Image: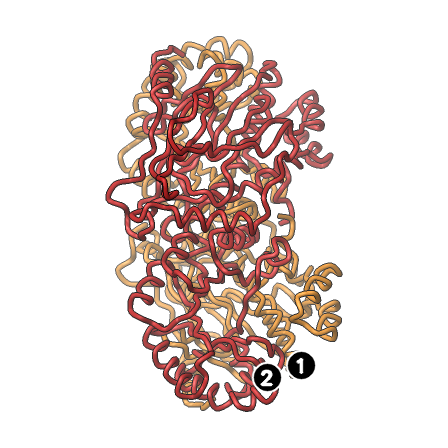
Chain colours: A orange, B red
Amino acid sequence: MNDGYTPMLTDLYELTMLQAYLDEGMADTAVFEFFVRALPPQRNFLMVAGIEQVVDYLATLRFRDDDLRWLGQTGRFHPVFLDWLRDFRFSGDVYAMREGTVFFPNEPILRVVAPLAQAQFVESRVINLLNFSCLIASKAARCVLAAPGKQLVDFGLRRAHGAEAGLLAARASYLAGFAGTATVLAGKHYGIPLFGTMAHSYIEAHEREAQAFSHFAASQPNNVTLLIDTYDTEAAAAKVVALAPELRRRGVSLGALRLDSGDLADHARRVRALLDQGGLPEVRIFASGSLDETRIAALLANGAPIDGFGVGTHLTTSADAPFLDSAYKLQAYAGKSRRKLSEGKATWPGEKQVYRVREENGLFRHDVVALSCEPPPSGHSMALLQPVMHQGRREPPLDPLNTLRQHAATELAQLPPELRQLTPAATPYPVQITSPLRALAHKLDQQAH
Amino acid sequence: MNDGYTPMLTDLYELTMLQAYLDEGMADTAVFEFFVRALPPQRNFLMVAGIEQVVDYLATLRFRDDDLRWLGQTGRFHPVFLDWLRDFRFSGDVYAMREGTVFFPNEPILRVVAPLAQAQFVESRVINLLNFSCLIASKAARCVLAAPGKQLVDFGLRRAHGAEAGLLAARASYLAGFAGTATVLAGKHYGIPLFGTMAHSYIEAHEREAQAFSHFAASQPNNVTLLIDTYDTEAAAAKVVALAPELRRRGVSLGALRLDSGDLADHARRVRALLDQGGLPEVRIFASGSLDETRIAALLANGAPIDGFGVGTHLTTSADAPFLDSAYKLQAYAGKSRRKLSEGKATWPGEKQVYRVREENGLFRHDVVALSCEPPPSGHSMALLQPVMHQGRREPPLDPLNTLRQHAATELAQLPPELRQLTPAATPYPVQITSPLRALAHKLDQQAH
């Protein structure tokens, strides 16, 4: 799989619609917006992520000759269309919320303004990219809220859904406040700090567990983490204590012991006692094994002396909510607002802006979804959709990942307290729809089609 | 994302363990096996998929110069190791179950026999590939069982977890019996039949719905599918009936109408009546919208006159079970069997084979997991793990996808009836562990480490 950014990663209907638009000469400007219709039952908020990937995709969109040949031989497309596809580029304007921003249902987080064919064509991949990155950032943010001051590391590559999911989950979780990832490629691509321990197989390949510890420490002497649950967790901790003087002599700095199975709170307490009694109070305890925000919160509430957590499968699949009810919808074409009425799926029409109104101390008070032509609401408010592309170029440049990560931390700190809990808030965060927007929706509902 | 097959898509610990193995001179042959520990609660069986991707990964594994430079500047690896990585290739033997084969917990579906470092290193990506493809094939197989004789199409790219998930889900669902996919790249890469309709935005971009139908049909005259729920489903069906004579004159063959919202059974009945009364009995009804195997079964049990289903989000995320409890574990090293004892995660040790014992009529009777050195069980049985790589080369060649798809259909036809239901079987399918395998596990448990 080395075709993440090929335009061929799309739904067939995008191409058949484009041919129809070309045949009909429909080339006026369209406005599409990406938003989420409703929160999954277990979420109080969502976090924006994946904007950089969307911008990269749009800025580099082009069909290759072999794509056009292949499309030609399907018999579905005529030569005039295929020629036109050869020069197909994205030349539109894009507005987006900054990555790391907290958002809520019915709020567009991305707006694409471009000739109809361009704005339509990118639908499949834009949803594919934003849905997943927002999903993981939102899940990771819950882990961060559950474990204040603890080190959280993404361990999820192996159960992530394929290569790109593993890579983007590392990025989205780091954005949301994780300390880093085990995924090497994410370190290389995004500069995310890398963490790693050892596998059970490493221990098993040695005749003696203590020998495995000693050899691994010799090869990775700086801040090494040893995995101690292969056979008997406390017996292994005792072996580490016995090895410690020799390791110290050899210049090894022992960073942490890792627990990966059994009753993690109970093991952590026993291992902590063994380490403290053995003169190793500085060695930390790191836990992993089917963890998610709820289990982490329970371990910490239980007083488990755990300093860091490896979060894998439940993070990178967002296991309790593996998708968002997201959509990328036409809001205006040729200067006229548009609205889909499908039962249960009606959308707010027109080109919109989202404003966040804050308390004096910065805490979120409420959001306002307005038509983009309306004046901003009074009070301490800020327009959340800002330009990220101008006429197909990346302009202004996006912030680096570490800046976005600080923004995400500020956002989480300014969430109303009831939204910071893992359980559903009694009342959802207020998102107001302005009167002009409601009036426009009502007017469009009266039209015949 | 264009690095799906780079060895840098791995966990950091694979590399740190390799350096330690090199430092220690541990280079004997290791046996690793991939298996699933337990079925998700909603599954009666699983289906093998993703073997071709694993073989491609292993056969092409190599580090590039810029990878080695990047690893060098992390300060974690010494020059001797990085030089050794430059020539690192996979030179082992691999055995696998054929894709499309049904499998059960504790049955290895892939066995890797290679020098320790090679067999260890590939763990992260082997799990990443097999876990996802098996997950989706297993979910898709349930949809196929729920909708005998119906056309099923993968519509899931937009909510799949990234690019590779979208592509591999199209492949895995086609393998399991889907008719095809909407994902263009899957058509190009794998030759999977493509299906597509139109988006609501296409309808909305036109002033009149009937005009949109007419224009789209003109541009896609062969077997066109029209989406009719943008404003009012039955009103749209009536417009199609009114348009039909003109479309026929223009040579358009109307294939199907698509429903995407509301009470699908109710709408299908009303639309079917409108089509039949309008002289269009040959036009089919295609449904989509948050479908999974349970909703499809309910629609069909309700007598809904639906001919085909687009299955999206719930398929490509395997929403009710978004991961498998899968593992890739060391079973033997340097000729000695190995066993992990971690609480709740103990594994069956040694190099193993899986036999399927069948009834006279071909139906599965039970499976046997044995040491590979044991004779096959008596009766009508077959060894399921077969060679797919020899000394790092693809040998013998894998079957083409359409052959594997036929194999999958045969497997589903030979499932015991209680496993073909969507609800959990009262008794799980019997997987017997042989006495020699049990004895080996017991013996290893007695060893000190």
Q: Say what secondary structure mark 2 lies in.
A: helix
Q: Quadrant of residue B440?
A: top left
Is B28 rendered above or below residue A357? above
In the image, what residue type sits under mark 1?
Answer: Asp
Q: Chain of mark 2?
A: B
User: For the residue carrying disc 2, how many other residues have a C-alpha within 10 Å: few (<14), some (14-19), or many (20+)?
Assistant: some
Residue B353 circle label:
none
Going 47% across and 67% down the picture, which residue do you hit?
A327
Q: Quadrant of residue B361?
A: top left
In the image, what residue type sits under mark 2?
Answer: His
Q: Which residue is mark 2?
A: B215
Judge left or right: residue A334 versus residue B367.
right
- Distance of label 1 from label 2 (alpha carbons): 8 Å
Q: Can residue B314 be seen? A: yes
Question: Looking at this view, is A191 or B244 the one in front?
Answer: B244
| Residue A67 pos. (x, y %) | 70, 60
Q: Which residue is mark 1?
A: A23
Judge left or right: residue B136 versus residue B218.
left
Is A135 rendered above or below residue A265? below
| Residue B177 pos. (x, y %) | 47, 55
Q: Can residue A382 be seen? A: no
Q: Say what secondary structure mark 1 lies in.
A: helix
| Residue A234 pos. (x, y %) | 34, 18
Question: Looking at this view, is A242 or A72 the one in front?
Answer: A72
